[in-house]
Image (cartoon, grey):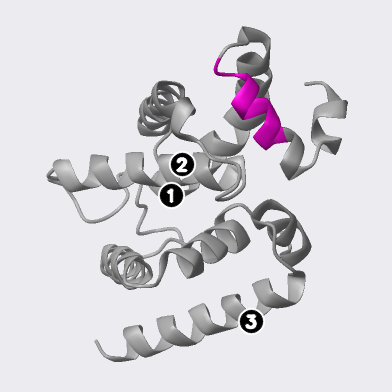
Amino acid sequence: MNTSLMNKNSAYWSRLAVAAITEPEALTELYEYYFPRVYQHILKKTGDSSLADELVSDTFMRMYEHLDQFDPQRGAFSTWLFRIAQNSINSYYGSKSYVTAAPWDEEFDPADPHARSPEKQALGKERTEELKKAIQKLPQRQQQILEMTYWLEMSSNEIAEKLGSTPGSIRVTLNQARNKLKELLEEK
């Protein structure tokens, strides 16, 4: 990947997104820069590489189909694109039913002293589902900042730049999101 791509700011990507409506080169540059980021985001959320492939394809197809609706005055391109990615994830999980053959990893070895028992694995999955449901109850901005912090491992400075905000504001919102999550999870 061209390292100069990494040095571009949020405004650059937003301008490029507007240009990509009519310029194939701009669309290619957006795709090359954002593909690995979107893929990692979706992979971290789903834990399934083949599903991530499917959802990334869906995300970029939706992006391409709706690029003319992107408004740089309303927010950064990255915010818009990651919202599309999240909508792809939500659509997929909202429309699928899952049947798991076993509530634990197939490679479970009871002789391994470090292996988690099937019960602990199931409990871990249950807690993960509770956390996902609690996160979905948060306001969209709090969800986005949590995702960028924990799934994309971005610093408050990086998030602030992407969202057109200040690092202090990001930290306050992140703290509010954590506190609200704690409340939601304690209600269970």
Instruction: Kindly report the distance in space between the C-alpha atoms of the residues bearing marks 1 and 3.
Output: 24 Å
Q: Nearer the viewer, residue 36 or 86?
A: 86
Tag 1 and tag 2, C-beta contact below 8 Å: yes
Visible in this render: residue 13? yes
> Residue 45: which disc?
1
In magenta segment, residue 18: yes
At a point 76% along the width and 35% down the height, the residue shown is: 12
**Residue 172: image tag:** 3
- For residue 42, the mark is 2
Q: Quadrant of the N terminus?
A: top right
Residue range of the region highlighted in magenta in the rendering: 13-21
Q: CA distance from mark 1 to mark 2?
A: 5 Å
Numbered disc 2: secondary structure: helix
Above or below 11: residue 34: above
- Residue type at mark 2: give it: Ile
The foreground one among 75 and 117 is 75
Image quadrant in which you'd find residue 34: top right
* Front disc: 2 or 3: 3
Task: Classify mark 1: helix, strand or loop.
Answer: helix
- Badge 3: few (under 14), some or many (20 or more) residues near its Cα, within 10 Å? few
